[in-house]
Image (cartoon, rainbow, N blue to C red):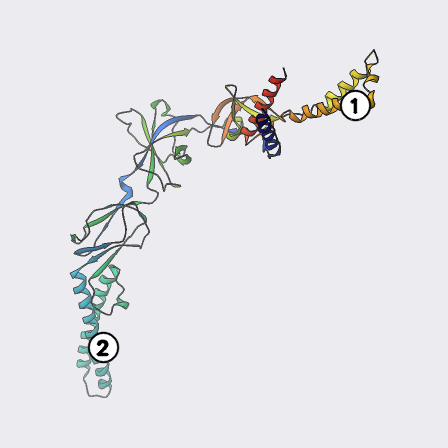
Amino acid sequence: MKKLLLISCLLSISVFALDIPTEKTKLRKFGKSININSQIVQLSSTKQSLTTLLDGRIKEYYVKPGQKIQKGQRVALIESITLSQMSSEYLSLQEQYKSLLDNYTANETLQKKGIVSLQELNKANIERNEMLSKLNTLKSQLEALGIDTKEMKKTTSNYVLYSHTNGIISDLLKPLHSSVSQDDELFSVVKNQAFYLKSYIPLEYAKEIKVGQKVSLKYNESILSTTIERILPEVDIQTQRIIVLSPIEKNSDNLFANAFVPSTIYFDTNKKYISIKKTALSFLNNEWVVFIPKKDEHMDKDEHQEDDKHKDEDGHENEHKDNDGHEDEHKDEKEEESHDEEPQYEARDVKIIYEDDTYVAIEGLNVEEEYVSDKAYYVKSLVLKSSMGDGHGH
């Protein structure tokens, strides 16, 4: 019994010590909403493939399925004989060009001295320009493969494949160490923010559905919001419902394609309702309630008690002053204790009309009326404790 009393006292102290937030009710717009079934999907247009640009053999993969990648990130290493030949030819052309450049410079000097004819100088210049053209062509091909020609000092066969998009690796399409040909697909990549919510809406709402309307879904203990982007022109054959697509652009890291989720679509409206935060709602005695602060009525009660005291015809009020006023002191102490134990809040029954992710439209409160906006469960525990105490008193 002592333990129960101690727990009750501690609960009372903790609730009174806690800062209970309050707000005032506001008028807000609430459209009609319906609960629907939706599916998380990935559209085929949001998938891309990474292909090799050279023949060769897959020497190493730098990524794994399910891994996030960024544009410009290396994804695979391919050993390519073609690259070996290209790099060898490039280095050879570089040396030939240097030789032709030196030859042209020397002829230019001799031509000024009259030793070499202008015809010979032009021939040297043509040879130099032809070699430079071949060198630049091969240089462009190598740089398109991600090869830095400025750093190339020797022949190489190692071709590094880089990603040209951001996304998530879906599949490795070729096994390690397998041979590949030019334009073979090595990876399937799902682009970032490629998840869509595919919602199924009854035909009776066909006239109310519009692009841009809000849709929220509950997934993995969190609520994600999106808007309708597309309304498909054909109904789903199996369900005979309208299909709408909504992009999921945020918090999509842990989403899984083909998962079915409950969602809510909100239709636009201009009608306003008295609203409160969802966190203010509590369930008490099989009813939805909101707690509101009690008005201070102690002063009125004390005044009535004082008037009754003076109207005592038998003069008993003087008796209360006997014994050095101890009886009155005990009475005041008891009244003080009873006032302290009374909850500072009272429950008000409400009816829920509409709701969105944060607010609910209700009946049962007035505009600008103060209410407990959060931590309602603490207030509920205080009210329940108080009602249990009243029961024991009777």
Q: Image point 44% across, 29% down: which residue?
A: 268
Q: Is residue 383 above or below residue 115?
A: above
Q: Which residue is mark 1?
A: 326
Q: Is residue 110 above or below residue 344?
A: below
Residue at the limit of the structure toward the front, as seen here: 2
Q: Image point 40% across, 32% down: which residue?
A: 218
Instruction: Decide if residue 247 is on the left or right side of residue 135.
Output: right
How many dots with numbers? 2
Q: Residues within 10 Å of mark 1 (few under 14, many from 20)?
A: few
Q: Which residue is mark 2?
A: 101
Q: Secondary structure at mark 2?
A: helix
Where's residue 115, x and y in %? 19, 88
Q: Residues within 10 Å of mark 2 (few under 14, many from 20)?
A: some
Q: Secondary structure at mark 1?
A: helix
User: Which quadrant holds the N terminus?
Assistant: top right
User: Which quadrant holds the C terminus?
Assistant: top right
Mark 2 / mark 1, whichever is N-terminal: 2
In the rendered image, is residue 300 in sight?
yes
Query: Is 340 in front, or is 42?
Result: 340
Residue type at the position of mark 2: Leu
